Image: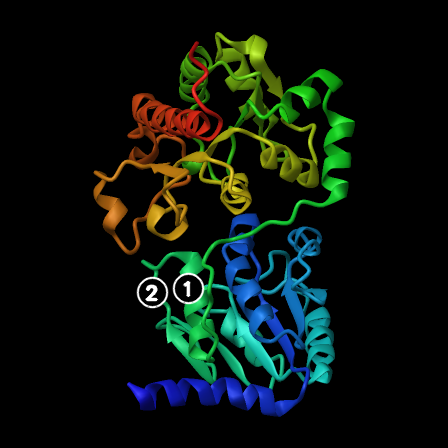
Amino acid sequence: MEPTRLRVATVRDRLARLCRRPRIAILRGGGLGDFLSTTAALRALRDALPEAHITLITGPTLAPFAARYPEIDRIVTAPSFPGVVEGPPDPTASDRFFRAMRSERFDLALQWHGGGTQSNHFVNQLGAKMTAGFKGDDAEPLELWLPYDIRQHESLRYLDLLRLIGIRASDFRSHLPVLPSDREELARVLEPSHLQALRRGRCFGLHASAGGLSRRWAPDRFAFVADHLAADFHPDAIFVTAGPGQEGDSSAVVRAMAARHLAVDLGGRISLGALVALIADLRFFLSNDSGPAHMAAALDVPSVVVFGSAHPINWGPLERCFHRQVANWATPCRWMVNDGCSDTPDVPCLTGVSPESVLQEARQLLALLERLDIHQHGSTRQ
């Protein structure tokens, strides 16, 4: 085993020899959940190389959210690039961008964006002294790479890559800073009575939308679960949220609820920062597989996540003590490499998730939280 440890160590040693404060570029496009899956690795990288100057290269949608992370020294917004940053191709802007990046003379460029079909070509154009990332069968190589395994959990994938360059993480959990501005934004949206209820710590949250139709559970099913949880656990309020342009999802849930007197419909009314502050103060969060579900896990807010077309092995919460996932594991396409799933709400992996199964997980989790409260504060029985 000793020779292997020595070989791994030499990669990190080489990086340390390049300069006292190595310049590192990280490519990570995609959405909120994509980025949050990298935050454990981001923290491990900063802990191992505290003097490094870390530049995140990403798209314009993700850049403002990523700016809250102190591990990142600078964020560069990349122009449209096939498979990396959405938008119509602009060869002139791309040429100008890569010339500017090569002038940075990065010591290391990390590809944290999929199997490298397009992203490896992107990283190779940065002109870094060393490159590392992932390689699928159709991707060009980097200097250091790991095979891209689609069955691996996304968060563990990036920690594996750090291990390749000699950095071993001590914590695999994602994390999400809550900023003072987040709470200020939330206070501007909520009525004082709702803000007070949230601060008492007995409010539930429900996120009714997702990026794809094949990941959006039916509103009447969410309402069924919310009504039963309201009757069983008596929350002070149930905050219902939805993504931008998907306000109809949250309003449909509220309309279908019998306990709509407890519902606070925030669809279309809340910023991303305010959503961070809201989730951070919830007792419990129920969500589709979505960016806010990853936020709840990163904030360590107890949650139940309903999975449709995306695979729980890749995107489910790593911890199962206070984070539960519900999926239809019986659909044959769940175990296929290329499932050909259509982005419609009637796919069997989504419709096969029964309201009763979600309610069962939520009840078990909330009952556990109540038992822990009794152990912590003592029995409330006379």
Q: Quadrant of the N terminus?
A: bottom left
The mark tally for this picture is: 2
Badge 1 marks a residue whose secondary structure is helix
| Residue type indicated by callout 2 | Asp
Q: Dot 2: within a 10 Å radius of its alpha carbon, few (fewer than 14), some, or many (20 or more) residues?
A: some
The residue that disc 1 covers is 157
Image side of residue 13 versus residue 147, left or right: right
Residue 78, image x and y in percent? 67, 65
Instruction: Establish if 205 lies above or below 36.
Output: above
**Residue depicted at 74% across the width and 26% down the height:** 189
Query: Label 1 neighbourhood size at 10 Å, few (<14), some (14-19), many (20+)?
Result: many
**Relative to 1, is 277 above or below?**
above
**Mark 2 and 1 residues: CB-CB less than 8 Å, in contact?**
yes
Quarter of the figure with the C terminus: top left
Position of residue 300 relative to residue 234, above or below, is: below
Residue 340: give x, y in percent of width and height: 32, 48
Q: Nearer the viewer, residue 58 or 305?
A: 305
Foreground pick, 137 / 180? 180
Quarter assignment of residue 4: bottom left
Q: Position of residue 227 (x, y in %)?
A: 44, 13
Place of residue 109 in the rendered image (x, y in percent of width and height, measured from the top left): 58, 77
Q: CA distance from mark 2 to mark 1?
A: 9 Å
What residue is drawn where x is 51% and y is 84%?
Answer: 12
Quadrant in the rendering for residue 247: top right
Residue at the disc numbered 2: 149
Which structural element holds mark 2?
A: loop
Q: Residue at x 54, y 27 (%)?
A: 205
Closer to us: 215 or 324: 324
Q: Residue furthest front?
A: 382
Q: Is residue 266 visible?
A: no
Which residue is drawn at the image coordinates 49% and 29% (left, top)?
Answer: 284
